[in-house]
């Protein structure tokens, strides 16, 4: 199974920098806040986040018809932080996303595009593990 996942990832152009797996202690906090996760837009192929819907590299969270509905937990793709946050903003504005936690690298705070999105939606920021992650 692991070999098959690696083959699919390679064929679809998956980037190693995007394969950050959410630590269980952070996932526990996410579930405590959200209660339930409706969508994981950047799921790994094993779909280890307990969400009702997963978008993997095979079915892309960026496809126009793949909405991020309800309660969303996203461990943002580090290779394209701006694109991820722009899509998150679009889903909020269009009313699909009701409640969300986006796990990001601390660099999101220093990026002008992502900072605008954070300000626009009045997102809260929590620092965890000495700025290794930011939950917004």
Image (spheres, rainbow, N blue to C red):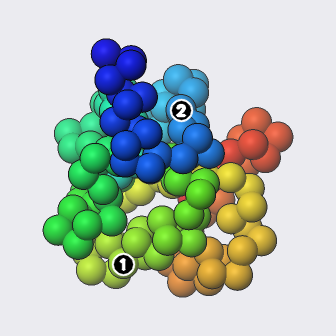
**Considering the image in quadrants, where does the C terminus appear?**
bottom right
Relative vertical location of residue 123 with respect to residue 103 in this rendering, above or below: below
Relative vertical location of residue 33 with respect to residue 99 in this rendering, above or below: above
Foreground of the two, 104 or 71: 104
Q: Residue at (48%, 65%) from the top-left corner?
A: 84
**Residue sticking out furthest to the right:** 130
**Considering the image in quadrants, where does the N terminus appear?**
top left
User: Residue at label 1?
Assistant: 90
Which labelled disc corresponds to residue 21? 2
Which labelled disc corresponds to residue 37? none
On the image, the x and y values in percent for residue 19 come to 54, 38
Point out the frontmost of discs 2 and 1.
Answer: 2
Q: Residue at (23%, 72%) from the top-left corner?
A: 64
The 10 Å Cα crowd at callout 1, few under 14, some 14 to 19, many 20 or more, is some
Q: Is residue 49 left or right of residue 113?
A: left
Q: Which element carries disc 1, helix, strand or loop?
A: helix
On the image, the x and y values in percent for residue 14 come to 46, 46
Q: Is residue 71 visible?
A: no
On the image, the x and y values in percent for residue 129 come to 76, 36
Q: Residue at (34%, 36%) from the top-left corner?
A: 8
Q: Is residue 6 left or right of residue 59?
A: right
Foreground of the two, 127 or 42: 42
């Amino acid at each position: 199974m692991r070999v098959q996942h690696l083959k699919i990832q390679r064929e679809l152009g998956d980037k190693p920098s995007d394969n950050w797996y959410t630590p269980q202690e952070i996932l526990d906090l996410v579930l405590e806040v959200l209660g339930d996760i409706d969508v994981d837009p950047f799921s790994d192929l094993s779909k280890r986040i307990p969400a009702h819907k997963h978008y993997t590299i095979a079915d892309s969270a960026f496809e126009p018809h793949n909405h991020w509905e309800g309660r969303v937990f996203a461990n943002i793709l580090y290779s394209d932080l701006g694109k991820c946050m722009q899509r998150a903003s679009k889903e909020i504005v269009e009313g699909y996303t009701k409640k969300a936690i986006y796990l990001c690298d601390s660099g999101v705070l220093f990026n002008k595009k992502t900072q605008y999105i954070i300000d626009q939606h009045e997102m809260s920021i929590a620092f965890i593990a000495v700025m290794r992650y930011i939950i917004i």
